[in-house]
Structure formats: C-alpha cells, structure tokens
Image (cartoon, rainbow, N blue to C red):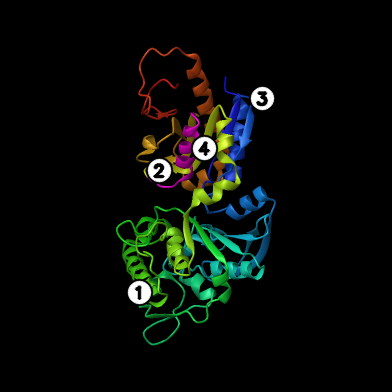
Amino acid sequence: MLTRFAVAPSGFKESLSARAAADAIAAGVRRVVPDAEIDLIPLVDGGEGTAAALAASTGGRLVALPATGPVGEPVGTHFALLGSRDTAVVEMAAVAGLSLVPHSLRDPGATTTYGVGELIRAALDTGVRRILVGCGDSGTSDGGAGALQALGARLLDADGFELPHGGRELIRLHRIDPTGLDARLAETELLVACNPYNVLCGERGVARVFGPQKGATPAQVEELSAGLENWAYVLKRDLSVTSDLYGGPGTGASGGLGAGLAALGARLLPRFDVLLDHLDLDARLARADLVLTAEGALDLQTPRGKIPAEVARRAKLHGRPVLALAGTLGEGAHTVPGVDAFTGILPAPMALAEALVRGSELLTDATERALRMILLGARLPVHTEVAADVPVEVSGTQRPSSVR
C-alpha cells in the first residue's frame, strides 16, 4: 500500500509556483489516500521562487528593493541573504523574468538585464563574500550586457557612444570599457546556477532555442544570434577571457547572462548541484513509496536539465517509482529516463489562458485520477508482459497497458 509520498515538482510557468504546485498535488493525493504521509519538496531550478526557497530552507531572509525591470521600468524585487550570512542569492527572474514582460512588450531584442546588475550591486553592499545568481525563466536575450552596464562597464559603439539596452544593439558593439566595473567583484565569489545544456551561440544557441518563446520572430532570432556572437567576441577580446563563451556549458543561461557573468570571472555551475544541496533531496526521496514530480511540459527538452528528469534520476538511485504530471505532453514525453508513468493535467482541450488560471485545480484533479489508476493497477493481476523500462501514460488512449 502506498502511504509515503514525496512531492517534488517544479513550478508551472506563469501559472503556479513550485510551492503552489506541490500543494495542489498533495491535495490530489489526500483525496485518494487521506492518511498519506506527504513530504512537500517544491523545487527550484534557478528561476522564479529560487531566492525565497533558499532563504526559507536556510533560515535566511529576503531583502526587498526597487530595481530596473526588463522593459526599463522600475519593479519591486528582492534578493536573499542565506542563513549563513556570507552568501546572497540573486534570482534573475525576480527582476528580468518573462513574467515581468507584458505580452504587448514581448520583444527580446529590447529587454534588459540591467536590474540583475543592480541586485548584484545591492548584494555587494551587504558585505557578503559569495553571490549565487540563479538563472531561469528569463525574458531577456542581451547576453547579460545590461547587468554589466549596471555594474559599471561601458559598452561603446564605433563612434564611442554608449549602447542602449537590448540584445538587438549588440551587433553594434565595438568596444567594452571595463575601468568603471565595481571593484568589489574581484573580492567576491560569483557563482551562477544554470542549465549546462544552454549555450550562447551556434545552432543550439540560446536565441534560436528560446528566442521564439520570448516573442522573437524568425528574423529577430537571426538578429539576436548575430549580436550574441559579436558580444562573445568583444567580451573575450576586451576582458581577456580565456574560457569558451560561444559554446561553453551554461553560457546561454537566461538569454546569455551566463556568458556575461562568466566574463567577469563567475563560475558557471550545474544548477542542481548548487541548489538542491540545501534541501537534503536524496534522503527525502529514498523514504517515499512513490515520488511525484511535475512541470509545465514533458517532452524532448525534459532530459536536458529539467526538474522532472533530475528528480527521476535521483529517485532511481534509491529504486523509487516516479510519476510525472505535466501541463502538456510533447514529443519524447515517454522517453524521460527514470519516469515510470506520466500524465497530462488537461481533461479536455481548453484555451491556454484558461489552463493557466485553473492550474491548481487541474493539477489536483489530474493527481487524483492518476493515483486512483495506479492503485487499481496494483490490485489487478498482470496477465501480459509490459516492457520494464517504458514509461506508461496513465490517462488517454495512446498507450493502453497495465500499470505496475
């Protein structure tokens, strides 16, 4: 009998925070197993909610302040001071995230990371020795140029004029003047928690992979890609960077913010290695009879550094079964390593706007449906062989099978 559940979801972009998703799944579990022991483990990947989650898990606090938002207007934002008091967490999504860009202004050629640099500067003012920058859920594609400007670098065109904000301006970058960079950066450890699969340039460059999600047209994608290639070239030349800014792991994080910060000496680290150490995740997964994870989409991108794949990988180290729930099921949903069963949360076709508003309700109902089917399957005799390593879709009619 299933009695112990580990609920370890990501957030659903523009719909549910990771905590809200965990609460919704738990509500669905309790409909089926009222006395269940549920360990809520809302997970962050560097995107929305990262600062708050790490502050809460370490006994730290959030510091609220205004800063420049992605479209150039002031926004209320925050960074975290961890309980150790020597580390600050800057969440780029809290000041330059896609959710802060109105739909009518979604132009990644114009949005800026200037506010990220302002948050880093504010964190430096507290005297911390280490700053962790969480990358994810960005609404920008400026390579971190805005952040460097906020930290004192001057980005100049061929006539010596300062470049305006936005990724489309990078193609005109001629020279970087670093003399005004905040001197405290040299005395502070700068870490970037990022998806190592995201690279700055090339066919899998960040503008081509994520630009359309942020509102870029095909022509803008090529414009942004060319600008980021020029950005990498000038960064390496003028800041004497020896690492690979074009295709190095994580350089494309948050619209290329990874590359910009790497040019300042930041270390780009796999986000889960940095973020999950604070949550004792492995031990908590090991105690569960069933692990439930979730994200907005389950598809070919999921194994490339997404939370459900990381949860499944770690759960399998302890032999724990994994159920994944997703807002949408795309190509490759059935190929995510370690996921034993999966389901979409939509009971019928509906408009995206409605699905976003009803996210909590849909996730709770889908959890209940999936868990009832799993428990029914556990009580039925198995008369046919089922491929052991193929995840089973527990709703719909595409893959009828016993659920073990």
Q: Nearer the viewer, residue 278 or 364?
A: 278
Q: In which quarter of the image is residue 4?
A: top right
Read off the residue under disc 3.
35
Looking at the image, can residue 227 be seen? yes
Residue 188 in the image: state x and y as whole percent: 57, 67
- Disc count in the image? 4
Q: Is residue 350 visible?
A: no
Residue wearing tag 2: 303
Q: Which amino acid type corresponds to the residue marked 1 in the rendered image? A: Ile
N-term mark: 2 or 1: 1
Task: Give coordinates of residue 86: x percent, y percent.
Answer: 65, 60
4 or 2: tag closer to the N-terminus: 4
Q: How far apart are marks 1 and 3 (CA)?
A: 60 Å
| Of the two numbered discs 2 and 1 in the rendering, the one whose residue sits closer to the viewer | 2
Relative height, residue 380 to residue 76 (above, below): above
Q: Which of 396 and 145 is in front in this view?
A: 145
Label 1 sits on residue: 171
Numbered disc 3: secondary structure: loop
SS class, disc 4: strand
Magenta residues span 301-319
